[in-house]
Structures are given as structure tokens and as C-alpha cells.
Image (spheres, rainbow, N blue to C red):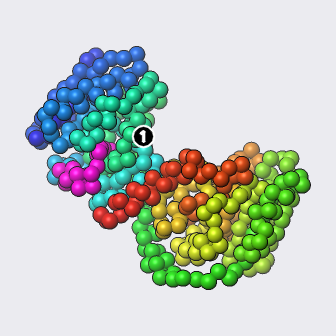
Amino acid sequence: MISTYVINLEKRKERKQHIYHEFSGKEEFNLLLVKAIRDKVGAVGLWKTLVEIISDAIPKKGDYILVCEDDHQFTNSYSFQTLSHSIRQAAEIDADIVLGGVSWFSSILKATDNLYWAEKFTGTQFMIIFKSAFKQIIDVKFTEFDSSDFKLSDIFKKIFFIHPFISIQKDFGYSDITSANNVEGRVKLLFKRSSDKVIFFNKINRHYKEKVSQVDNLGPHQVGFSLPTYVFFSEEAECHAKISSQFDGRDEFLIKKIGVKRRNGYLNYWLEIRLAIEDAISNDDEVIIICNENHQFSDTYNARNLFECVVEGYLHGLDCISGNVTDFDMAIPISNKLIWINRGMSLQFLIIYSQFFKEILKVSYDKKDNLCHALSNLSLQMAVIFPFISCQQSSKNLLNDDSAKVLQSIIVANSCYSQYM
């Protein structure tokens, strides 16, 4: 039997009744109702209760426990066989926590047939917590500004969830922890969107896995090319000098410099990009690069790596490849150099393939819009080169970049769990 702790606020009688109903007839669970510790900040009270549960579990020397909140609800995908199988698989890959279902996640990777590694998540209504996590949960500092799900995401790098979800949150129309969930129907929608996002991830993942054999057969290539490169800069002499210096002695780029007036925000920039695309079409270019005055080559840049990325991107059927990225919430490694991203292309350094030219020209751009977001919304075939080959003029310290840290954690997880698939 699974040692199961269910957290319940004493005043929430309807939730107590609900959770007893959920576990009724499921003899695989040894249920213990835990009175939630009250605190002026609900999240703090929840964490204190979790610490109390862990403290109770340690002397019992079990390999894991199940902690549920009183809004947990089993889905039709639940079976004891599925749960047991998932726990066994999780133990084999040294998981710290396994979640029955999540209402949101950032980047994920498929680790086993039904376990997905998650970089960050929300949804603590059903958690298998392994003993490897006990001490860190007890020792960590938790403040009034923290939330349980994000705190756990920060502490542990081996968190997984089961999909299809075996647990969601029952929508009571209110939440004692998350005020945003005080809207009837919102919680149900969050889990639906999250599940749909997993299905979308699997579709993208399968698509690029089918291309791997082509990329693997790429073989060594000589670097002997010049990529048409449109360099956009403000018309000030200083900006011109800075961006020009980046391309000095780099014969792999065929430079076309374009001055852009600062007024009208991104509108003038957009108009010049359109002219560059039209120029590329008239020249029958298969691929071009656009970059702006903020671009600076990182220490990891070299011409051979760029060339290999351009060829890999073509074989993968990509529309564009960014030299860096700052705004994304889902990423999938598709080679040892390229990571698919769901949004966040950067105009700082952007490789664009000819198949994407006409789509760009179709855009009706409003100067109030974010240009990068407008272009990102046009395609699902985007990637970023990692390690980044482009950084801001102001800094080359990529290790301090949040996006770089997230992508690095995804790369590490992928190297750990890809062997199980």
C-alpha cells in the first residue's frame, strides 16, 4: 500500500467529502488526512504542512510517499497498474518527484513511455515524493513570496509528470492558495491546455526525430561560402562602426549595410526588412541572415559551426534560426547544435530560409506590435543555435543569461533521459 497524505483545511468540509470519495474503493492507498497548518499566507501554510508530512515519513523508512491536496481528482486514465509502472520507471531514473498531472509547464522532455521531465511546473495536487527529496524539502527556506510548485522546481532537477494525466484538480470555483483560480472553470481549462501542450510537444518531437538520420549523414564539410547578410543599424556613426567591426575579416558573410532611421519605432526597421526579403527573392537566395546593431559574436562562434547549423536547419525544414533567444517557454533539442523553440526569434542575428520569405511579406505590421513576436507567430519551425553565437554588444557573459541557463538544463536532461527512449 502507498503511504498517502491528504492535506485539508479543517473548514473545507466539502473538499474533505470530495477527497474521501476520490479514494473510496482504492485499496492501494493507505490514506491519512492531514490537517493543514493555517498561515496568513496560504502558500506558506501549505509548505509548512508539507514539511510536517515529510518529517512524519522519514522515520518510517519508505522509498516514497504520496502527498495530495484535497482538490485532487482521478482522471479516467488512472489505474494502479499505470501508477505502479510509472513509479518503477521513475525509480530507475532516480526521480525526486513524480506528478500525477500539471496545470502548466515550461520545457519538457519525454523520458519514458509515459513520464515527462519538466523544467518548471504548476500543480501539486498529486505528488509522489521519493526519499531522496525529503531532506532538501525540510531544509530549504520558504518565504511569503514563494509558491510550492516553483520552489520545488528550483530545488529539484529530476521532476517528472505522468501523461496522460492520472490526476487533475477539481474545480471548486475558488482556491485557498492561488487567487487567480477563483474563477469557475479556469482550473479545468488550465489542465486541458497543459495536456494539449504535451500532445503538441510529441508531434514536434516526432517530426524532428524523423529528420535525424538525414542530419546524422551530413558528414564533414569544407567552409567555402558567403551568406548574404543584411546588417541594419541606426544611422549614427558610432552604431555603424560597432556593427561593422563585428564582420571584419569574416569572409563567410556577404555584407549589405542598411541604415535605419529611429523614428516610428520598429516600423522603419520592418520596412527595411521587407526590402531585404524582396531583394533576396530577386536574387534567388536560398538563405539569408539579418542582424541589427546590437549583435556581437560570442566567444563560441566559428564559421564551420555556422555552416553546419545552416545545413542542418535546411535538412530539418526550418524556417529560421536565431543566434540567441530570450523569450520562449518550450524548447526541444533537435541536434547537438540546434534547439527548437516555440517562440522568441531574435532579430539580433537571424538566419532565414527562402521557404519563409513570402510568409514574412504577408505580415501586416502595426508599429504598436512587438516585431519579434509578430514574426514568431508566423512559424512553428524555429530553432536557436546553442551555445549562442550572438550576444548583446554590452556583454559577452552568456553564463549569466537566464535563457542560456534554462537551455543548458534542458541539454543536460536530454543527455540523461534520451537513453531511456
Residue 211's place in the image compared with 154, above or below, is: below
Label 1: how many Cα within 10 Å (few below 14, some 14–19, many 20+): few
Mark 1: secondary structure: helix
Relative vertical location of residue 308 with respect to residue 184 in this rendering, above or below: below
Q: Which residues are magenta?
A: 84-103
| x 57%, y 46%: residue | 400
Q: Where's residue 154, x and y in %?
A: 42, 40
Q: Which residue is at a point 73% across and 77% down the rendered structure image?
A: 226
Image quadrant assignment for residue 419: bottom left
**Is 189 left, or right, of 288 in this rendering?**
left
Q: Give the camera-side residue of 46 and 57.
A: 57
The C terminus sits in image quarter: bottom left
Q: Is residue 191 magenta?
A: no
Residue 257 in the image: state x and y as whole percent: 83, 65
Q: Residue at x 20, y 38 (%)?
A: 65
359 above or below 197?
below
**In the rendered structure, does residue 99 fall within the stretch colored magenta?**
yes
> Dot 1 corresponds to which residue?
154
Query: Residue sitting at 58 percent across and 48 percent down?
Result: 401
Q: Quick check: 307 left or right of 105? A: right
Quadrant the N terminus occupies: top left
Pinpoint residue 252: horizontal percent, then vertical percent.
71, 75
Residue type, numbered disc 1:
Asp
Identify the image quadrant of residue 227: bottom right
Horizontal side, residue 386 vs residue 364: left or right: left
In x, y percent, where is residue 204?
A: 46, 63
